[in-house]
Amino acid sequence: MSETGQQLRNKDIVGIKDLSCDEIELILNTAVGFRDVLRRDIKKVPTLRGKTVVNLFFEPSTRTRTSFELAAKRLSTDVINFSVSASSMVKGESLIDTAMTIQALGADIVIIRHSSSGVPHLLARHLNASVINAGDGINEHPTQALLDAFTIMEKYSRIKGLKIAIVGDILHSRVAKSNIYCLRTLGAEVRLIGPPTLIPEGLIDPDIEIFHSMEEGLRDIDVVMMLRIQMERQDRGFFPTTDEYFRFWGLTLERLSLARPGAMVMHPGPMNRGIEIVSAVADSPQSVILEQVTNGIAARMAVLYLLSGRRG
Amino acid sequence: MSKELLDSKDMDRTITRMAHEILEKSRGVERVCLVGIQRGGVYLAKRLAEKIKLIEGRDVPVGALDIALYRDDLNIRKEYPAVRQTDIPFEITGQVVVLVDDVLFTGRSIRAAMDALMDIGRPARIELAVLIDRGHRELPVRADFVGRNIPTSHEENVEVEFLEDGGKDKVVLNQE
């Protein structure tokens, strides 16, 4: 007799780009119930007993993989971690064959991370199982954007109309791209701040303001979303040195004071302290960096629940 | 086709009687808390708490429990139910928890609710209060406090409406 919920339209979550405003709100509302579960002594519910979730990671990741693994376990699923070095990919098996094998083992949901953009989309087309993108190349990282939006909602109870700055290496950041889609869909005013070499102008929605100065960009901001400088992608001289990067783009207490009083500071981790953010900011009461980690589990539980719950 | 079984005055009198019965059984409100099942049960639990306050002059803690994650029909449903908030901002371990729901039917929601409660704490006792008992139990569940017993057929459906939900207080029997 209980009312049925709204549903997600697709069997997969490969990008925020494909989600409607209603679907994003459904995920965020569902995550509230799971955050409550995570606050109890017994942080587990029997909901998805008998389902199998496979973490298929072709790129090293501890945080995201652990977060998905915990989310799946707290819903009582069986979780298998399939990492590339241990798999037969090294023996020359194709990506699709690996995925088909995992499906034949009985996976209901496959969570994939890959260094090439578009791999989750490819798998989603070949598998009957649901596919969740846990980060593909420089394209998207949808669950990071969902947990970020959830964290903002927790503090402000809304996203519409908030001024949100995303700071740093937008060009290489799948986190930034997913956040831009998500926050714009939910009605935030999004600004990008960073050096011209790291902001892909022209590829971006014309309503998004771009600033090449922290001092100008941070004014009146409600939320500052810092990005990690991806050391592994900086071999082509997008900026001269990390010292210089810090001087121009590092988030210091002084720069943070230009934003709205009490503005929220976010970072997807892992942080490079002293390069994109100073410890005094990262550890300040305005920082929600650890809440983001906790909320990541709730948001991912919501996604696993909603994908399991949709039929036909 | 639908028929009004209780109007707002009937509902109010019934809830008043249930509040008296809860107090009588527990000899006051010491160690008693009310936990409503989302959503109708939550409205009813708040009403009961207001009545208890009027009668006894004491506040009883009121919580809300969502049972979506504990349902036994997830694998046979067309789609999963919406997940609502569980908000029990007090300790239930060692307390007498009066579980509150609007309609008691198969008893399956109550089984789910008891499992959900047990994951939150270990109550000294769980009691059950329902506004309407419409019969057709599929599990060995019995209510301690019943507003009205209304025998129904499987084709019928009992709907409890609350002022808080945007309508007015009434209980309606719908025929399919």
Image (cartoon, coloured by chain):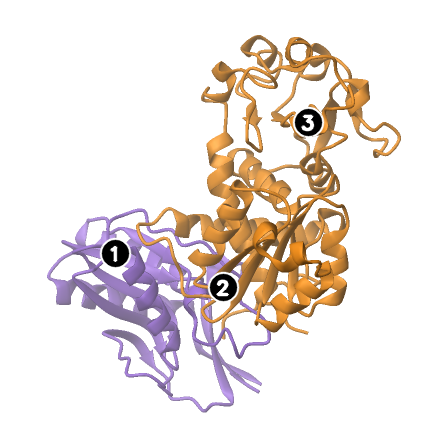
Chain colours: A orange, B purple
**Residue A258 x %, y %:** 62, 12
Q: Residue furthest front?
A: A91
Disc 3 packing (10 Å; few <14; some 14–19; many ≥20): many
Q: Which residue is labeled 3 in the image?
A: A166
**In the depicted structure, whether residue A10 falls above or below residue A201:** below
Image coordinates of residue A62 in percent, x first then y, are 52, 42
The circle drawn on residue B121 is: 1
Q: Nearer the viewer, mark 3 or mark 2?
A: 3
The chain identifier of the residue carrying mark 3 reads A
Circles 3 and 2 on the same subunit: no
- Is disc 1 in contact with disc 2, using a CB cutoff of under 8 Å? no
Q: CA distance from mark 3 to mark 2?
A: 48 Å
Q: Quadrant of residue A234?
A: top right
The residue closer to the viewer here, A213 or B173, is A213
| Residue A138 % position (x, y) | 74, 39
The CA span between labels 1 and 3 is: 42 Å
Report the residue at 71% width, 54% height from top.
A120
Q: Are marks 1 and 3 in contact (CB under 8 Å)?
A: no
Q: Nearer the viewer, residue B146 or A38?
A: A38
In the image, is residue A203 above or below residue B90?
Answer: above
Q: Secondary structure at mark 2?
A: loop
Query: Which quadrant holds residue A139?
Result: top right
**How far across and how far down the image is residue A67, in percent?**
50, 47
The residue positioned 74% from the left and 20% from the top of the image is: A194
Mark 1: which secondary structure?
A: loop
Q: Quadrant of the C terminus of chain B?
A: bottom right
- The one of A112 and A295 positioned closer to us in this rendering: A112
Report the residue marked by disc 2: B168
Chain containing the residue with disc 2? B
In the foreground, A283 or A137: A137
